[in-house]
Image (spheres, rainbow, N blue to C red):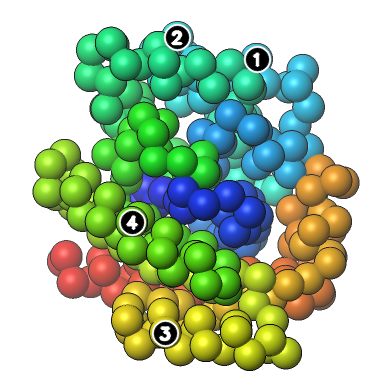
């Protein structure tokens, strides 16, 4: 059965797209069939996987509009086992267009329900907001993965996001759960980082992954070369951390599957 995970945080600059691209790459590298959906109008996940504007003929806007299927929109990437549904700036107008549309909250779910047998996992890179695009992703997903930057204001946003997930679960998607929270831009030399980690783990316990993603120049450089960090420099600390995160995510998924069985 295909598992659908939304990678979401309404705050920008927390490493959301970086996590989406590199987690998808790491999962594909160990043999999982992965589809990454770029649902952020900025299109950074598409760029980070080497897709120029001319490579995005069928995209996530077409998927939501019902003009293209998953099979028509998904494109193979330079990473074996990893496909991408790219996006363009046209997606920025989708939220306005969806306001009066039928089944406006379930457009993505309807599109994904048509055919996902080719994939083990679908990862959705959500925009940095809690609008209709993110709502569509949450309604379509089995779980959410939340990248959390190690800074004070991130904690305030996390509380709001968790309430939103709870509201969506109660009203539209009773299966939705928090798969985990990953601490990003982690700097062990910074005492604030240590305090944030203590607070988050104290509040959320086992929901916080043991793996943390360090600040790393090579991670920042990789998108400008159109490559995931794991391909750009597989031995850098950031790449090694995302490989560990993928293993931890899959361990949790296996545990969930056993509990369901």
Question: Where residue 76 appears, x then y in whole percent?
Answer: 65, 35
Q: Residue at x 57, y 67 (%)?
A: 149
Query: Which element is circle 4 on?
Result: helix
Residue under pointer 3: 199
Q: Is 214 rendered above or below residue 116?
A: below
Q: Which residue is mark 2?
A: 67
Image quadrant where one finds the C terminus: bottom left
Q: For residue 59, which quarter of the picture? A: top right
Can you say whether 132 is above or below 127 in the image? above
Label 2 vs 4, first from the N-terminus = 2
State the separation of the CA atoms marked 4 and 3. Answer: 16 Å
Marks 1 and 2, the one that precedes in the sequence: 1
Sequence-first tag of 3 and 2: 2
Seen at 54% across and 22% down, the residue is: 92
Q: Position of residue 139 (x, y in %)?
A: 27, 39
- Circle count: 4
Q: For marks 2 and 4, give the CA distance.
A: 34 Å
**Could you give the CA–CA distance between mark 4 and mark 1, rounded to whole angstroms?**
35 Å
Q: Earlier in the sequence, mark 4 or mark 1?
A: 1
User: Is there any visible trace of residue 168 in the rendered image?
Assistant: yes
Residue neighbourhood size for the residue with mark 1, other residues' Cα within 10 Å, grouped as few (<14), some (14–19), many (≥20): few
- Residue 56 drawn above or below residue 127: above
Residue 240 visible in the shown view: no
- Distance from the alpha carbon under mark 1 to that under mark 3: 45 Å
Which secondary structure, mark 2?
A: loop
Where is residue 186 drawn, in percent x and y? Answer: 64, 77
Point 39% across, 68% down: residue? 180
Residue corresponding to mark 1: 57
With respect to residue 203, does 105 lie above or below? above
x then y, percent, for residue 112: 35, 31
Residue of label 4: 160
């Amino acid at each position: 059965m295909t598992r659908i995970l939304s990678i979401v945080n309404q705050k920008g600059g927390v490493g959301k797209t970086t996590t989406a691209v590199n987690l998808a790459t790491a999962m594909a590298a160990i043999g999982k069939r992965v589809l990454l959906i770029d649902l952020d109008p900025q299109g950074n996940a598409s760029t980070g996987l080497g897709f120029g504007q001319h490579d995005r003929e069928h995209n996530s806007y077409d998927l939501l509009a019902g003009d293209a299927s998953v099979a028509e929109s998904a494109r193979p990437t330079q990473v074996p086992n990893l496909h991408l549904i790219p996006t363009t700036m046209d997606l920025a107008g989708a939220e306005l267009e969806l306001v009066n549309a039928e089944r406006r909250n379930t457009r993505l779910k309807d599109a994904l329900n048509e055919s996902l047998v080719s994939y083990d996992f679908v990862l959705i890179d959500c925009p940095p907001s809690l609008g209709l695009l993110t709502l569509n992703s949450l309604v379509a997903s089995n779980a959410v993965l939340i990248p959390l930057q190690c800074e004070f204001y991130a904690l305030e946003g996390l509380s709001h996001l968790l309430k939103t997930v709870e509201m969506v679960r109660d009203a539209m998607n009773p299966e939705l759960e928090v798969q985990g929270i990953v601490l990003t831009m982690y700097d062990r030399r910074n005492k604030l980082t240590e305090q944030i980690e203590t607070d988050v783990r104290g509040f959320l316990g086992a929901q916080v992954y043991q793996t943390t993603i360090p600040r790393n120049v090579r991670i920042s450089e990789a998108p400008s070369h159109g490559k995931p960090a794991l391909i750009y420099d597989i031995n850098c600390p950031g790449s090694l951390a995302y490989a560990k995160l993928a293993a931890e995510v899959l361990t949790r998924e296996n545990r969930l599957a056993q509990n369901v069985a």
